[in-house]
Image (cartoon, helix red, strand yellow):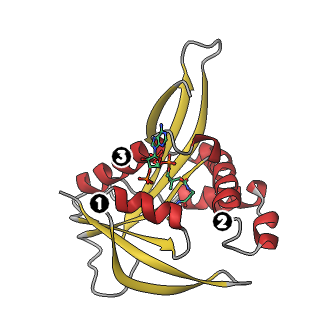
Amino acid sequence: MAALDIRPATGADALAIATVHVRSWQAAYRGLLPQSHLDGLDPGRSRVQWKSVLGTTAWPSAGTLVLVDSDAASVPPTESIIGFAGLSPTRDDDDDDPTSVGELQTLYLDPGAWRHGAGSLLLHAAQDQLSRAGFVTASAWVLETNVRARTFYEHHGWRFDGSTKLHDWGTFVVTDVRYRRPLV
Ligand SMILES: CC(C)(COP(=O)(O)OP(=O)(O)OC[C@H]1O[C@@H](n2cnc3c(N)ncnc32)[C@H](O)[C@@H]1OP(=O)(O)O)[C@@H](O)C(=O)NCCC(=O)NCCS
């Protein structure tokens, strides 16, 4: 990795984000989700959905941050997106208040970048952004069997709050667990 920067995503990043998303899913969820589903993921198709997600950006409380590996010294300068984090007010309809609870909707890194501290960098930037937006608590839903991510969040002070939900992906159903962390 050359130099890592974090910036707000734009609509032009849709394909790069979709590519990281698919690569990260295929590596992280192998053995956890049906292989046929993972094999069928296609960045070219999901790019359209990402374009629409990016179109709903409403900073400071909602949007996507991208983690960029950039090399300003190369000619021409190069930049590649190696991770992203999606933020919004909580979408949960329980007692959580969307003016005080900010949701980390997504946090995905390209598998080639795992375990070099880049995920921690992006998580800290996401927490800082939620805090700047006025939220006092951050929440995130994690696949129950995603031990790598659960350990990572716990290392960063997030805790399972006891809430679970079934997530219906159409062809399969999984259990998600909710984590939260104070933003002080
Ligand atoms: C979860 C995820 C974002 C973490 O990103 P990452 O860049 O691997 O995270 P880091 O490198 O900052 O930290 C990961 C671990 O590597 C360790 N680590 C960091 N730098 C290291 C290094 N140079 N050498 C060895 N280990 C290192 C950290 O201590 C940390 O250990 P821990 O999880 O036990 O605390 C990443 O694995 C990912 O994208 N996973 C797939 C998607 C996913 O599951 N997302 C969550 C959806 S809710």
Residue 21 rendering spot, x and y as whole percentages: 64, 55
Tell whether label 3 touches label 1 (CB within 8 Å): no
What amino acid type is highlighted by mark number 3? Ala
- Residue 177, compared with residue 70, is above or below; it is below
Residue 174 rendering spot, x and y as whole percentages: 60, 83
Q: CA distance from mark 1 to mark 2?
A: 23 Å
Q: Is residue 141 left or right of residue 23?
A: left
Whether residue 123 appears in this view of the structure is yes
Q: CA distance from mark 3 to mark 2?
A: 25 Å
The label on residue 125 is 3
The label on residue 157 is 1
Disc 1 versus disc 3: nearer the observer: 1
The label on residue 29 is 2
Q: Residue at x 68, y 48 (%)?
A: 15
SS of the residue at dot 2? loop
Q: Is residue 183 left or right of residue 119?
A: left
SS of the residue at dot 1? loop
The crowd level at tag 3 (other Cα within 10 Å; few <14, some 14-19, many 20+) is: some
Where is residue 69, by image quadrant? top right
Q: Is residue 43 left or right of residue 9?
A: right
Front residue of 174/30: it is: 30
